Image: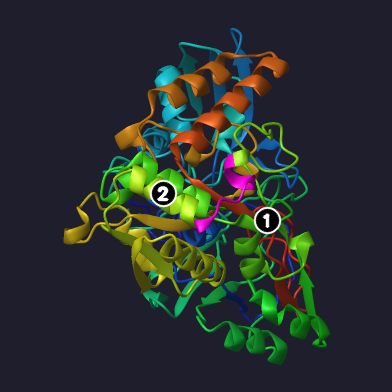
Amino acid sequence: MKRRTLLAAGAVAGLARPAISRAAAPLIFVPQGNLVTMDPVWTTATVTRNAAAMVYETLFGRTDALVPKPQMVAGAVMEDGARRWTLTLREGLRFHDGERVLARDCVASLNRWMKRDPAGQTMQERLDVLEATDDRTLVFRFKKPFASLPAVLSKTQPTPVIMPERLANTDPFKAVTEVVGSGPFRYEAKEYVSGSRAVFTRNEKYVPRDEAMNYSSGGLRVLVDRVEWHVIPDPATAANAVVTGSVDWLETPLPDLLPLLRKAPGVTVGVLDRTGYYGVLRPNWEQGPTANLGVRQAMLAAIDQVEVMTATMGEDRSLYNAPVGLFVPGSAGENEAGMEKVRTRKSVSEIKAMLAAAGYKGEKVVLFHPTDQVFYNAMIGVVGQAFRQIGLNVDEISTDWGTVVERRTSHATLDKGGWSMFPSGNPAAEYVDPLLPSGVRGNGKKAWFGWPTDDKLEALREAWLDETDAGKQKALCEQIQARALEVVTIIPLGQYLPPAAWTKKISTPLKGMMPVFWGVEKG
């Protein structure tokens, strides 16, 4: 069946929806930073992930307990010892341009995503065939068992979103600028003002699943007509806007302002993301001093995670865990291998000796400092000082997060606009084992920005994927963590759980890994 190129407005009959009482006033939300792109495959920026989740859908969603559930698919059948999966799209799926969502859209979208995402690359390496056998059926045939398919297809950064085939067939290393999803909200591109505002409106044609909402799974029912994101870089101004009621929801209040917000009448403060974020520094393995193993090891030794997390979240220890290794506390992968590298504090003179032994001679280290991101700003304030204290020649580039997102894609040398290191807050829920986290990979040009190459790390991860015995998987997690800390693919900074603040004009938002706007009412 061939698709018509365009359907006239109103040509598609609206499918029945439950009657919903909605407030006319828009829901005003203050995100953690400026929204630069709406392509969650091209970037791992959290602000893009959060916005894209409103507009795009994924084949599988997740509950707040991180259990994968069918979302765009009506069902999934696993056969031949997890070597064959058959997914059937549910009825009623349409893109915002009116076109039906077809299986070939999903194939093209997943092919694009697999080129960028570390877990997607793992899937692609094990994949024999991915095909659309008809308009609603996708078939995956794997060379090796791959029972983790639902977990991979429900991940959030980079997100395996489904877009029309014509957009999915574009270069995954260039951001898609036309935003066409099938999710419960539409993106109003004409109302976007960089650094100021992004607007999303309810998708009138969206048909929710006939199930209860649970984070990104179930029947995603939108109860407001319009959501406006207002970018407010100054934390005090943003907090005051919640107190006065001029905005409804503040994603990430400055920790120092939490006592004020807790005392404010009509304001609720709470942790919506119960797993939080895994703070890391990502070194560039291709350019400058950070391409030197000994320099990276000295940088790791210079970081006191507790100091970084205290600066980031304040004195309330319930809002962070530190020190942490490669896998977050309480996860299946958590272990003590190599932890002496983050637990044992070396003196400044000892670390300077490490730099000297590595042959460091004062070369510039370009460190991105995103000043418009509350947590990254605090992290780099401590990190930059620690690096200067051990004798690194730090060129600290104070800029906005959107610029970091753009510049970190560059492979240029430092004298031509390249970089050495940037901070990132990755979803902690994806650092529970070696399957999903970007920081575990050592696959060179295909890796997350920084492009580490380490064959041993890759081999250990492959062995973990092949292993079915839990005890042996645990032992492999220990080897993976020890190796990653030895070669320094990332520098862990700690797990942090930032609270949000919202007014009592809106109902309590759903808990999950990111702010979700379905199920929220405004009175």
> Which one is nearer the viewer's eye here, 282 or 499?
282
> Which one is nearer the viewer's eye here, 504 or 457?
457
Q: Which residue is mark 1?
A: 17
On screen, residue 444 versus residue 426, left or right, reads left
> Which one is nearer the viewer's eye here, 120 or 337?
337
Q: Quadrant of the C terminus?
A: bottom right
Q: Quadrant of residue 201?
A: bottom right
Residue 344 magenta: yes
Mark number, residue 353:
2
Q: Is residue 12 visible?
A: no
Q: Quadrant of the N terminus?
A: top left
Residue at 50 percent across and 78 percent down: it is 231
Residue 153 magenta: no
Residue extending furthest toward the left: 416
**Dot 1: element:** loop
Task: Say which amino acid is labelled 2.
Answer: Ala
> In this picture, which residue range is highlighted in magenta?
341-348
On screen, residue 237 versus residue 287, left or right, reads right
